Image (tube, rainbow, N blue to C red):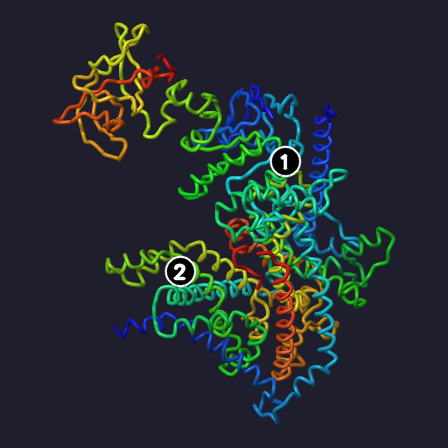
Amino acid sequence: MKLNKSKGWLYLLPALITLGAFLVYPLIDVFIYSFQEDFMTASQEYTGIGFGNFSYVLKDPDFLQALQNTLILVCITVPLSTGIALLISLGLSSIKRLRGLFQTLYFLPYVCNTLALGMVFMLLFNKTSDANVGFINNIIEAFGGTAIDFINGPYWAKMFVLCFYTIWVVMPFKVLILTSSIASVKDDYYNAAKVDGTSKWRMFRKITLPMISPSMFYLIITGFIGAFKAYSDAVSIFGSNLNASGMNTIVGYVYDMLYSEGGGYPSYASAAAIILFIIVLTITCINLIISKKHVHY
Amino acid sequence: MKTKIDYKKIERTAAIKSNTASAITYVLLTVWGLFVLFPFYWMLLTSVKDYGEYSSEIIPKLYTIHPVLDNYGNAFTAEPLFNYIFNTLIFTIVTTALMLLVTVFAAFAFARLNFRGKGFVFVVFLSLMMIPSELVVITNFVTITNLELRNTFTGLILPSVTSVFYIYLLKENFAQVPDELYYAAKVDGTKDMKYLYKVLIPICKPTVVTITILKVIECWNAYVWPRLITNDKAYYLVSNGIQAIRESGLGRDNIPAMMAAVTVVTIPLIVLFLIFRTKIMAGVARGGTKG
Amino acid sequence: MKVVFENLTKAYPSRDKKKGGEVIAVNNFSFEIPDGKLIGLLGPSGCGKSTTLHLLSGLQKPTNGRIYFGEDDVTDVPAENRGVGLVFQNYALYPHLTVMENIIFPLQNRKGKDKLKKEEMHEMARETAKLVQIEELLYRKPNELSGGQQQRVAIARALVKKPSILLLDEPLSNLDARLRLQTREEIKRIQEQTKVTTIFVTHDQEEAMSISDLIIVMKDGVVHQIGAPQEVYDNPNNLFVATFLGTPPINLFKGKIENNKVYIGDNAILNTNVEDVSEVTVAIRPEGFLPVENGSFSCNLQRVEVMGRDISVIAEHECCEKPSFRAIVRSENLISLNGNTVSFDVLPHKVFVFNPNTGDRII
């Protein structure tokens, strides 16, 4: 009988050990790191305990740049991608023929390596000084514009490419979720509305939208979280030295602080990670409060 | 006398309206489809362009008359691409297998076994789901470095074998299987292990397949952790390999060969997706977020 | 409003792509429904009842034939202009709207000069809610209501726009047995009060018989009989109608007609003037048996079940199509049953004779 009692723990053991070592302990540790001032990796020594790491990070121009980039990225890509995904899903749900084909096609980027495909985007938006001009710049020139260096050029151009690629990458998931959510609205509701002479627009506003509102808010919340954690998209387009190109993100800043040419500062990295965590937590809470009011049933 | 309304006419205008609407829908959907496909096309196209031809094009052409496969050869010889793919395969298979083992056992314990402290542990598990990986990666990096496990498969794999979310997903599914089946098995003298893989897993196969697929995609595309933990090319996974190729190798002087490398790392998952597309899409719709 | 179906046919492309071809849900349907009546559309599942209802509402268009509301040909009129109220089997109440919002939903669709003020709509909704007795539930959400209450809300939503025809799809199938009895009385009352032509679909013959002014019996997309419930019960057109109506079901025997007599086995049970037929199906309603000494129809007695007012006599006969058959006898008519045999006289108006192959009525 005694064996029986402990059997449960036995089955849990592998999960408990790995989680303890790689999730619980690090979680505690990251807070400790973030308060240890002037921590030296080599000697494992620190000079004091306090908010020094946080104030350093918050004054670091690299961090402020990363914060700004991340905020712009979030504010542009979350509403745009959700909106476009809604339009596409509505379109998909209104057709019968070729629907499966379109759905499969739209989902393709989800399974692909973000790093690899980012390189294709880099190529498309490229403007190299010598011979080759990227495809997008070809089009711009064909319409009489001047080529823009999207990869190494002005800030807004780089931001545009980053947003563009981010939207392209997150779209498959959103379209999939919304299409299946729209499909789950029963036909009877639409039939009932049709017999009552309801216009298409009213059907959308009064039936479809409220019924898919839980999925919409799910997408908005996960969209915010995902966009705040943006990193590898930026690396794939601008290369791994993001501080140099001025396109770093908060997560990128954390990793760079931890390990790169200028790295080796786990304390600063921890402080930045905790700042990010607090921002994401706040935004998620705000989202949840808003969704309580607007999401139906 | 009621005024007669020409319903036929109403019908006809309605039909025209809805036909136009559906035509516009198809056009827009096709445009988005091209939008999604174009980068893939560009990748394939560039990868089969002759290096000389590509370099001499001031304006890149939208097609090529003489596709060549040389770039693929160049990509494999100039870079240890085969090595990257092999590493990623090992990483993906071992991580997914270990993850399945850990997840199935933990889910079984939560769903079927009774032991003291189960409720508490499960609540702790649930709250662990909210922890972003960015928070813990710092200490993990230090831990793995201190254990001198950098540039080893152990170091690559260990931190990602347990996923709280997958345990939760599978536990919910296990719990839906009626208790009677378990008691019936007990009465027949079936061992827990046998019940687990003869009854529970077959019944919950869709969820098991789902988490396997999600984990495979996640592993194949992993970038951040491998980048931190490996700086020896012999242990690079495809993401890091590609990044290295771009920054120090072919990316500088042989774009078609770089695109060949990009194609090689992209194709396996696309093929996998096309084979299992309904399962993958259903799985992601049920419980997936990217990465 | 009077409703006329004229040679109505609805065919779907077959789901089985390999076979191809079409599935005919409704086949060459013609009938007339008088104004202001409660009509039950009755048939086993998959017989095309729901398709008929959708054709009426305009949600589906017929492949062939015409539909008239009164004198107007509405075949090409889209659903929103037909002015029908439709109650769905699962009610299709909008879960995110309150009962009030659900009921005024159809009214809010009106545009232009038909547009209503908010107070008018609320007044109309309240009136309708009163009719179906849900005034006190107006500000609740559908998921806070019981099945029966949801049903009433759905009826109110269909009635609020004063439809010329009210259609109900399996209105009682989602309710428990006790509520079913109550709700069907309710539907009858509402129909009588509003006098709107009401058509409801059901597979339950008892339901249809109990409240309909007229029943339409369907099978496989074909109308088998139209008439007042009692008339259809007493005078079925064919074997299907005879077997589909009545609980307990009608008893079937193999028989023949010889020398102006109907035989079951060796027993001549009925006189007739029909010519000889070597093979017929004789159908006798359970209440058509009268146990007597030395009756014309003798059988082996199996058991007797006493159910209060009525008594069931379960007996066997070699010609019966089932192992046993059931006779329902009023207790005052019961003679003492001893031994292994029982004999009956049969009541001629409870006996129908059919062609066993085509199902057509012979007597």
Name the quadrant containing residue A272: bottom right
Q: Position of residue B236 (x, y in %)?
A: 56, 69
Q: Position of residue C315 (x, y in %)?
A: 21, 26
Q: Quadrant of residue C346?
A: top left
**Is B242 left or right of B145, judged from the image as shown?**
right
**What amino acid is found at the position of numbered circle 2 in the picture?**
Ala
Mark 2: which secondary structure? helix
Residue B261 in view of the camera: no
Tell me if residue A43 comes above or below residue C189 in the rendering.
below
1 or 2: mark nearer the eye: 1
**One can see residue B138 in this view:** yes
User: Which kind of residue does numbered mark 1 sit on?
Assistant: Lys
> Of residues B67 and C107, which is closer to you in this image?
C107
Residue at (53% x, 50% y) in the render: B277
Residue under pointer 1: C162
Q: Chain of mark 1?
A: C
Q: CA distance from mark 1 to mark 2?
A: 50 Å
Q: Quadrant of residue B179?
A: bottom left
B150 relative to C234, above or below: below
Q: Position of residue C269 (x, y in %)?
A: 25, 14
Q: Which quarter of the rendered picture does the N terminus of chain A lie within?
A: bottom left
Residue linked to disc 2: B175
- Horizontally, is C301 left or right of B110 in the view? left
Quarter of the image with the C terminus of chain A is bottom right
